[in-house]
Image: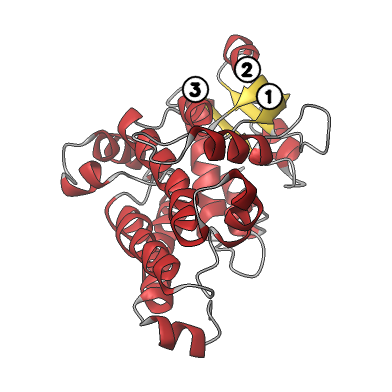
Amino acid sequence: MVKQFLEKPYALSALGEGRYGEPYYNYLALLHLILVKRGGKQGFVVPGLIRNALKICKKLDLVFKKSDWYFVQSVGKDNPLSVETTEEIKKMTSGVKGRGNTEDILCGTDDKILERFYSGAISNERLGEFEQYPRCCIEYFTNNVWGDFVQAAEIVGDDPKNVGTILNIQRAADQDERIFQRIKKIQLEDVAGTRINFPYVFHQACSNCLSDAKNSPSAKLNREWSKVAQEFPELNNLIVQGARDEAEDKKRLWEKSWQEWIRDGCWG
């Protein structure tokens, strides 16, 4: 099956799609589905927008179930925003069951795991738990995401009336250099750092894991999963090279001043 996939690859990850998609993530997704098949990981989510989600599950004879969940925004630790602004952000970013939610495909080691996770409120923490990301990395990612809202509120004002604007500019690096500098740091240190040090993990490693590239929770997962990848030499080579290329792409795009980044068309 791996040989057939590599002869004619197709999308398995949302990160492998679109204008800025990287095929590396499709190869990495295949590895993680193999890990589920082998019992090396309890579950993996294939986004509902990926047409081949059911196809790959059937090819690998995996247990799978369509999600019936709705997104709930997680609040970062030591949140400095007012209760009113916080609640308004949660309200405006959280999904409502049955209203435009994409049915993701949950692949798991058994029905019991899928029944536990497939429905109800889904947050970054709960998704990370299903995918078995290290707890430290889940918390770090949650803080990073919430930090986007915090910074936007610092720019336009901590007021529930400003939440619409906060949501509009939270990742708009072209509108404010402070936002650019924040995203630049995340892209270069966290995202590129993870690809360089831990090419086999799907999550974004936290700063503590990156500072201990040999013995941290992310390092241990990367080492364990690399052994499975090496059973498929061609797939392994594509993952290793793809991770390097992804890290280099991040450097090429973000090792610039704000003025240079704007001049070059922001993303390219």
Which percent across, then down, holds residue 41? 45, 26
Give 208 or 71, whichever is nearer the viewer.
Answer: 71
Placement of 182 over or under 224, stated as above or below:
below
Sequence-wise, the earlier of marks 2 and 3 is: 3
* Residue at image location 36% in from the left, 34% down from the top: 77
Q: CA distance from mark 2 to mark 3?
A: 9 Å
* Residue at image location 67% in from the left, 41% down from the top: 92
Q: Is residue 238 left or right of residue 248?
A: right
Amino acid type, label 3: Gln
The residue identified by callout 3 is 42
Amino acid type, label 1: Phe
The quadrant of the image that shows the N terminus is top right
Placement of 264 over or under 5, stated as above or below:
below
Can see residue 29?
yes
Categorize mark 1 by other alpha carbons within 10 Å: few (<14), some (14-19), many (20+): many
The residue identified by callout 2 is 114
Give 36 or 130, whichever is nearer the viewer.
Answer: 130
Could you say which quadrant of the image residue 254 lies in?
A: bottom left
Q: Secondary structure at mark 2?
A: helix
Q: Nearer the viewer, mark 2 or mark 1?
A: 2
The residue identified by callout 1 is 64
